[in-house]
């Protein structure tokens, strides 16, 4: 990295990218992160309690961060043995170059009532080499001014547009200046945060770093070092008051799931809250949840609530467990999509799905934050738009085991089909699924047509084509003829309601789909991991 010109917003002698974070006991510790040019290798924090003139010093751990455009020194100072519920003032830097004075407050002891805010998908890619986060900066400052008792900020991921290019992190921190020096900033890794291009100028050769290289190098000392062995920094947990938080990355799902189960089974906190970028109860018409389900189902179902992002619109699910939807929070996990905080309308058309109890498309140039107020065994969440509109407000009450405002998930008297959470509507109203001798059957031709596939009906047989696979199902036969050969079905095809051929739902696997039955709600849900939206071809 010798003989190169410092980029715009590049590191300098003066500390920048100053950020507070929770890394340890929130009552007695605080982590301070900053960077300088790589020639500076020594840094420390000077700090004092508001009610004291005694100035204390904590030396920082330092590592060199060589990015695609710059060379910097990263500093992480862990302030320990602080007094609970106390305001502190601090500066960071070295003997020659020091920051301005900032402040923070530690958590009070035995805290059960507090407030934090959530943001997601605030990434901005323009201008290309100097992303503009000024709108986001002003928005969050206003929210904090209106909510001065905010304890920390939690994100749902996509903090940058391309996190494997430092120009993006420089832009993101321009949007955090004047905020995270005083309010701890707890980031969730999004897919954009570990995305890069082999040629950033041309936007070619896209790749995803596993683990998230630039994220880990900048924040390895910012967040607790308690994640799964191969995926630390992008996975971590922390406690605040009576809440245990699990921040989940987007890589290594099998290992992360095992870690989640062990971690969540060990905590005795009143609330268990997760943050994971990809939504389980997604709203996109062509999205999927294979990134997490079923691989991490067991771990996610140990949370009371999971915040997510990715889709840039708002939705809140009914409590979900094992494909089933409930009204009572004790029976499942609530999945809460945070919308976007920085005028980033959703790139895919969003729809309200069967699992959503509340929904807002946010298909406008707007911003949203979620204000979370914990009060003992109740938690109130307010999805607030930048213009003051409230997209949703709900209270989860553990004592009464209810969510207000009240909403009931559907319970159908005939077994319906759902594709990606969408009802097939009137085209399937009179052809419900049927169970015979422990085998579920459905008119799969209706499902395939709804999903955008090709359907050819002939006497006593139907040919179906979807996602590059073709299969012929014949009345009375328990074999599907496919392009790769015969596939045995668990039972023969029969002619059912409205003379439709009823095929064992396992037949969907021919098209690389999966299915699950919701006993509590009486519907069968079908999924596919492709995000391609099929459309039949017009000759």
Image: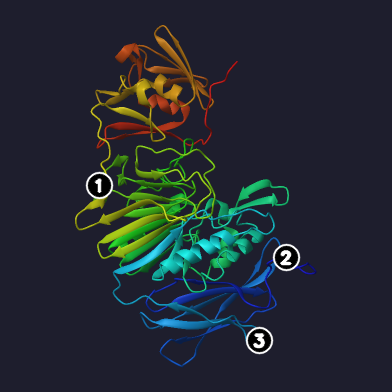
* Residue shown at the point (56%, 83%) measured from the top left: 44
The crowd level at tag 3 (other Cα within 10 Å; few <14, some 14-19, many 20+) is few
Q: Position of residue 316 (x, y in %)?
A: 36, 47
The image quadrant where one finds the N terminus is bottom right
Q: In the shown orientation, is residue 276 left or right of residue 272?
A: right
Q: In the shown orientation, is residue 501 left or right of residue 103?
A: left
Q: In the shown orientation, is residue 147 left or right of residue 522?
A: right
Disc 2 element = loop
Up/down of 511 relative to 477, above or below: below
The crowd level at tag 2 (other Cα within 10 Å; few <14, some 14-19, many 20+) is some
- Which residue lies most toward the top here? 459
* Residue shown at the point (33%, 11%) measured from the top left: 499
The crowd level at tag 1 (other Cα within 10 Å; few <14, some 14-19, many 20+) is few
Residue 7 is labelled as: 2
- What residue is shown with label 1? 406
Q: Position of residue 380 (x, y in %)?
A: 31, 58
Disc 1 element = loop
Evaluate whether residue 329 shows in this view. Answer: yes
User: Between disc 1 and disc 2, whose residue precedes?
Assistant: 2
Evaluate whether residue 504 shows in this view. Answer: no
């Amino acid at each position: 990295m010798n003989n190169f010109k410092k980029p715009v917003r590049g590191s300098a002698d003066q500390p920048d990218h100053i950020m507070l974070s929770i890394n340890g006991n929130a009552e007695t510790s605080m982590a301070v992160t900053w960077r300088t040019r790589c020639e500076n290798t020594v840094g420390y924090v000077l700090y004092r309690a508001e009610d004291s003139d005694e100035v204390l010093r904590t030396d920082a751990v330092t590592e060199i961060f060589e990015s695609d455009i710059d060379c910097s020194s990263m500093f992480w100072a862990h302030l320990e043995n602080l007094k609970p519920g106390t305001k502190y003032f601090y500066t960071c830097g070295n003997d020659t170059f020091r920051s301005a004075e900032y402040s923070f407050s530690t958590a009070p002891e035995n805290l059960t009532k507090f407030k934090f805010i959530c943001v997601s998908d605030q990434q901005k890619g323009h201008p290309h080499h100097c992303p503009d986060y000024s709108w986001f900066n002003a928005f969050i400052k206003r929210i904090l001014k209106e909510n001065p008792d905010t304890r920390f900020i939690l994100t749902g991921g996509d903090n940058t547009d391309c996190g494997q290019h430092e120009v993006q992190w420089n832009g993101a921190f321009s949007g955090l200046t004047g905020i995270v020096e005083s309010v701890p900033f707890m980031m969730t890794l999004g897919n954009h945060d570990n995305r890069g291009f082999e040629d950033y100028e041309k936007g070619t050769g896209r790749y995803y770093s596993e683990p998230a290289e630039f994220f880990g190098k900048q924040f390895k000392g910012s967040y607790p070092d308690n994640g799964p062995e191969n995926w630390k920094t992008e996975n971590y947990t922390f406690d605040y008051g009576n809440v245990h938080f699990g921040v989940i990355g987007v890589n290594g799902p099998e290992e992360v799931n095992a870690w989640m189960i062990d971690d969540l089974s060990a905590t005795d906190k009143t609330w268990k809250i997760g943050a994971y970028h990809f939504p389980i109860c997604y709203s996109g018409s062509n999205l999927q949840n294979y990134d997490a389900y079923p691989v991490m189902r067991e771990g996610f179902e140990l949370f009371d609530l999971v915040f997510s992002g990715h889709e840039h619109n708002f939705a809140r699910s009914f409590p979900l467990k094992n494909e089933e939807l409930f009204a009572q929070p004790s029976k499942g996990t609530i999945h809460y999509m945070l919308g976007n905080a920085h005028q980033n309308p959703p790139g895919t058309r969003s729809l309200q799905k069967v699992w959503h109890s509340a929904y807002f498309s946010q298909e406008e140039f707007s911003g949203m934050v979620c204000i979370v107020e914990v009060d003992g065994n109740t938690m109130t969440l307010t999805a607030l738009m930048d213009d003051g509109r409230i997209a949703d407000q709900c209270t989860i009450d553990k004592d009464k085991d209810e969510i207000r405002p009240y909403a009931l998930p559907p319970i159908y008297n005939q077994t319906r089909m759902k594709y990606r959470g969408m009802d097939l509507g009137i085209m399937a109203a009179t052809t419900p699924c049927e169970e015979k001798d422990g085998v579920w059957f459905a008119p799969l031709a209706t499902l395939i047509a709804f999903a955008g596939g090709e359907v050819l009906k002939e006497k006593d047989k139907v040919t179906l084509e979807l996602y590059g696979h073709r299969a012929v199902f014949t009345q009375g036969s328990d074999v599907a003829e496919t392009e790769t050969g015969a596939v045995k079905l668990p039972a023969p095809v029969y002619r059912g309601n409205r003379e439709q051929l009823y095929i064992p739902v396992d037949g969907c696997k021919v098209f690389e789909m999966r299915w699950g039955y919701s006993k509590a709600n009486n519907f069968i849900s079908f999924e596919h991991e492709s995000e391609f939206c099929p459309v039949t071809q017009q000759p």
